[in-house]
Image: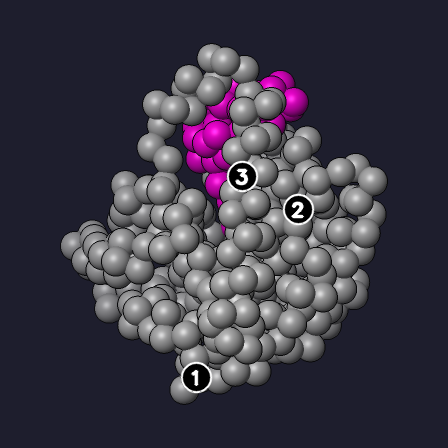
Amino acid sequence: MKFSNFLFPESQSPDGDYDVIEESLREAELSEELGYDVVWLAEHHFDGGCAYVDPTTFAAAIAARTKKIKIGFAVAQMALHHPIRFAEQIALVDNISKGRMIVGVGRGTAYNFYEFRGFGIDPDDSHEMLLEVENILLQAWTTKDYKHNGKYWQLELPVLRPQVYQKPHPPMIRACSGLESTLEMAREGRPFMMNVQSDEVTVERMDQYRATMSDAGHNDETVACNVADSWVWRNIFVAETDAEAEKVGIPYFQNMRSYLQTNRDRMNTAAELEAQASRIVGSARNSLEHGIIVGSPETVTERLQKVHGTGVGGVIIHFRLGAMPYDVAANSLKLFAQKVAPNFQD
């Protein structure tokens, strides 16, 4: 099972943006030094929930400051990107990094309606836009004289330059928040990223993912490869003892969840808040029982055993929770690499 660091740094004030961005670059370098497989980047706008906001630009900075760690998106919000501009940016960073890009895509946030408004996008169009962009990206990276006449974009592309470093193209993986979108990936024979869920839901969903892929006619080798290329997200804080981990980590987790909701309450309109309330909100990500793994290396190792038992390829770990100071998060990052990860090596 692979382990990775989800760089999702919060900056509650514009005055703190520079420091948080610089610390995130240091955290990417530290992740490579400690042997993590991937650094994942988020995309959120206007609220400080993700200080660097633009994963493509930030990926280029990380590529220039690291040598071997892979760089993935969890996720880039496809409704907010022009597909050809995005295809070019990915191709460029794939070259700068010598083939370390993993292109994680999603429809965009289900709750931050103000992000769509800021880009002049109707959130009701975001899923269809995601599907159209996925198709455009694959064709743009692999096809000359490509023409596309879709619902949202009409394009004529002689040839994409630079070409992508990875052939035929960088791996592309979709984030799935619900069961049906997960099973859609299974039927298509594609890997997926699962958002924060309870261990029980994770086990059930991985079983359903495998079974649906087999029922759709995919052979055992394809099923095994896609499971190995899939990822689940966990918020984790490690300290020397359970008591210390709970004392330090839990308040930062709770404040992070509160800050995200406060932004939505403040920046969404009344109608948007009503629409948000009508959607299914994953309770797992908000609860102490399921939303965070916190404890000593021994406790965290035990908590991860169920995830390991599913056979999923990797865990996307959010270490720096909310406004947690860099040094505190770095210590958790080190403890995990030194005392937890070795327990899951073959």
Q: Nearer the viewer, residue 147 or 318?
A: 318
Residue 49 image point, x, y percent: 63, 41
* Magenta part of the chain: 104-131
Q: Quadrant of the image for the N terminus?
A: bottom left
Q: Are marks 3 and 1 in contact (CB under 8 Å)?
A: no
The residue drawn where x is 49% and y is 70% is: 243
Residue 10's tag is 2
Q: Are marks 2 and 1 in contact (CB under 8 Å)?
A: no
As helix, strand or loop, the secondary structure at mark 3 comes to helix
Q: Amino acid at mark 2?
A: Glu
Residue 330 image point, x, y percent: 67, 68
Seen from this angle, which residue lies furthest top?
Answer: 271
The residue drawn where x is 33% and y is 32% is: 280
Residue 343's tag is 1
As helix, strand or loop, the secondary structure at mark 2 comes to loop
Could you classify mark 3 by the number of other residues whose Cα lies within 10 Å: few (under 14), some (14-19), or many (20 or more)? some
The answer for how far apart the CA atoms under marks 2 and 1 are is 30 Å
Question: Which residue bears the numbered disc 3?
Answer: 258
Relative to 319, say whether 212 is above or below.
above
Q: Amino acid at mark 1?
A: Asn
Q: Nearer the viewer, residue 335 or 21?
A: 335
As helix, strand or loop, the secondary structure at mark 1 comes to helix
